[in-house]
Image (tube, rainbow, N blue to C red):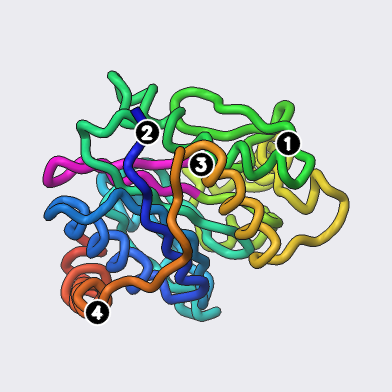
């Protein structure tokens, strides 16, 4: 049986609070009967997002972020702190009973990230899924993914690093032992890669988004033409951005 056609949104660059608000607004739409939805987007200004269960003070140097205009936001999803700079981000929302949700969390991660792996093939990159929730090329991680399950739906979103600056990242993210920061940075450089590193050239968000769209079209069964979020979704996203994601009670709740 053919899968239900996915709705396709590409919202490009927005601030962290709106990006997280729109993910939540689309999740609400799908929960109330809208089609499963794929969204591609990016971050402007740069941002640090922390997982739902993380302690803000343990993970982020807020003063350093403020000094250079980097947003700080707490996600609905779990996982670790992420520095969002030069990257492509995707989110995909499906009902928990959708075939791509699979029979386990591991299976859902694999199924829902498969389009990104296929998109990387379009760029000539032979990437693979690495349990529980990473995408790798050779021995380097190039994408991390996270989930939440709410209102009978799965929201999965993930990053694809177009380039990476480990020194800049760890000027904003904290390490358990400051004396070991240099070793942590060298470890990250050894374990984390980016699309530009692999290709040996720079890559734009636009080029990466086109490849990701092509990849998701190949694996989702049916992906509709690019469309805009609905007026209600945009309204709810803006409200959520202000009332939840920009609210210090939410950001500093742990």
Nearer the camera: disc 2 or disc 3? 2
Residue 180 lies, in percent from the top left, at 61, 42
Q: How far apart are labels 4 and 3 at the CA level?
A: 30 Å
Magenta part of the chain: 144-158
Residue 221 lies, in percent from the top left, at 46, 38
What residue is disc 4 on?
231
Are discs 4 and 3 less than 8 Å apart at CB? no
Q: How far apart are labels 4 and 2 at the CA level?
A: 29 Å
Nearer the camera: disc 1 or disc 4? 4
The main secondary structure of the magenta stretch is strand
Q: How far apart are labels 2 and 3 at the CA level?
A: 29 Å
What residue is disc 3 on?
144
The correct choice, above or below, for 240 with respect to 148 in the image is below
Give the side of residue 31 with respect to residue 14, left or right. left
Point out the residue furthest to the right here.
200
Q: How far apart are labels 2 and 1 at the CA level?
A: 42 Å
In primary-sequence order, the first of circles 4 and 3 is 3
What residue is disc 1 on?
190
What residue is disc 2 on?
2
Neighbour class for label 4 at 10 Å: few (<14), some, many (≥20)? few
Residue placed most toward the observer, 189 or 242: 242
In primary-sequence order, the first of circles 2 and 3 is 2
Quadrant in the picture for the N terminus: top left
Give the side of residue 253 with respect to residue 21, left or right. left
């Amino acid at each position: 049986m053919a899968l239900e056609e996915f709705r396709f949104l590409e919202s490009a660059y927005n601030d962290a609070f709106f990006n997280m608000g729109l993910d939540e607004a689309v999740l609400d739409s799908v929960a109330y009967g809208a089609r499963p939805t794929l969204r591609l987007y990016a971050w402007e200004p740069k941002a640090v997002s922390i997982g739902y269960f993380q302690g803000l003070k343990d993970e982020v140097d807020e003063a350093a972020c403020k000094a250079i205009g980097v947003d700080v936001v707490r996600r609905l999803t779990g996982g670790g702190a992420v520095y969002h700079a030069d990257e492509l981000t995707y989110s995909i929302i499906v009902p928990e009973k959708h075939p791509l949700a699979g029979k386990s969390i591991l299976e859902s991660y694999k199924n829902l990230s498969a389009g990104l792996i296929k998109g990387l093939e379009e760029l000539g990159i032979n990437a693979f899924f690495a349990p529980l929730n990473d995408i790798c090329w050779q021995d380097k991680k190039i994408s991390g993914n996270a989930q939440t399950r709410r209102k009978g739906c799965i929201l999965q979103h993930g990053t694809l690093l177009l380039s990476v600056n480990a020194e800049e990242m760890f000027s904003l993210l904290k390490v358990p032992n400051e004396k070991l920061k240099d070793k942590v940075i060298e470890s990250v450089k050894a374990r984390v890669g980016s699309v530009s590193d692999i290709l040996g050239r720079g890559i734009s968000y636009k080029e990466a988004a086109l490849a990701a769209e092509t990849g998701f079209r190949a694996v989702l069964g049916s992906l509709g033409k690019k469309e805009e979020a609905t007026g209600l979704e945009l309204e709810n996203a803006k409200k959520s951005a202000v009332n939840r994601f920009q609210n210090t009670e939410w950001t500093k709740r742990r």
